[in-house]
Image (tube, helix red, strand yellow):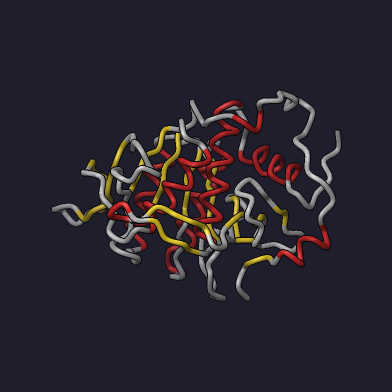
Amino acid sequence: MVWKISQTNHEQLAINSAWPATDMSDPDFRHGTGAGSRVCLLDSGVDPSHPMVGRIDGAYAVTLGIEGNWEVAPVHSEDTSGHGTACAGIIRSMAPDCELVSVKVLNGTSGKGDALLTGLQWAVDQKFNVINMSLSTSKPQFSEELRQICDNAYFSSSVIVSAAHNMPVESYPWRYSSTISVGSHTDPDPEAIYYNPAPPVEFFAHGENVTVAWTGGETRTRSGNSFAAAHVTGICAVTLGQYPNLTPFQMKSLLYLVAKNVKAHT
């Protein structure tokens, strides 16, 4: 099945929404800017000239070195498909003052599994607060190493936000419990989070008919779990900007408590 939730489905579960009072009672909690949080976007690169994106605080690409080893190197920021620019624009709209770094692991809309592993390992080593992965691999030979990297991120307090595959195929890393897995819902509210009581997808976010930045200064209307994941990344960036010591477990718990179909206990 495709991992999406319809308006009618989540209305059946809807109760109310509230931010948890314990240690989170600051009235400005939901209105932070992401300042102080560091976000890494693993994607197709980013077009920093787009007004919806603004500054990029670092641009890197995973390439095959002279000796045949995959490596991460600084590059001029550019996007080879538009997908990374779209996700970057969403993250900026949610967390305008976060530090946003692009790591290009895709050429166009496809990439090598080894490049993905290398880029993710680099991001974990750099201790980013949030790592956005609006992509996945269906190649089982990369699964175990990818799981180990995601587990290491979890235990070192880097939050990985991973989009569920849009097609009914087995892919990774969104199926790992060490990531925050995201599908899309039809609610137009960019801050609306819904908890999924029937995992493996854990949360649903705004991903249907989203106006996104695109290369060449364009905007397009797109749907997909990639864009839902970018909204959750923005929410995590805002949260971790104000509460930088939250662990991935606590971040998941917070998303659960603020979900529109979960009643937070105060």
Q: Residue at x 53, y 54 (%)?
A: 162
Instruction: List x then y, in percent, for residue 134.
Output: 47, 56
Q: Nearer the viewer, residue 237 or 33?
A: 33
Asked if residue 248 shows in the view, the reply is yes
The x, y position of residue 263, in whole percent, is 84, 45
Determine whether 6 is above or below 169 in the image: above
Residue sitting at x 71%, y 23%: 26
Q: Indicate whether 190 appears above or below 98.
A: below
Residue beneath the point at 80% across and 49% down: 262
Q: Residue at x 67, y 49 (%)?
A: 192
The image quadrant that residue 185 belongs to is bottom right
Residue 187 image position (x, y, % from top left): 66, 57
Q: Classify residue 93 as left or right of residue 187.
A: left
* Residue 259 at x, y percent in the picture: 73, 48
Q: Residue furthest left?
A: 66
Q: Looking at the rendering, in which quadrant would you find the C terminus?
A: top right
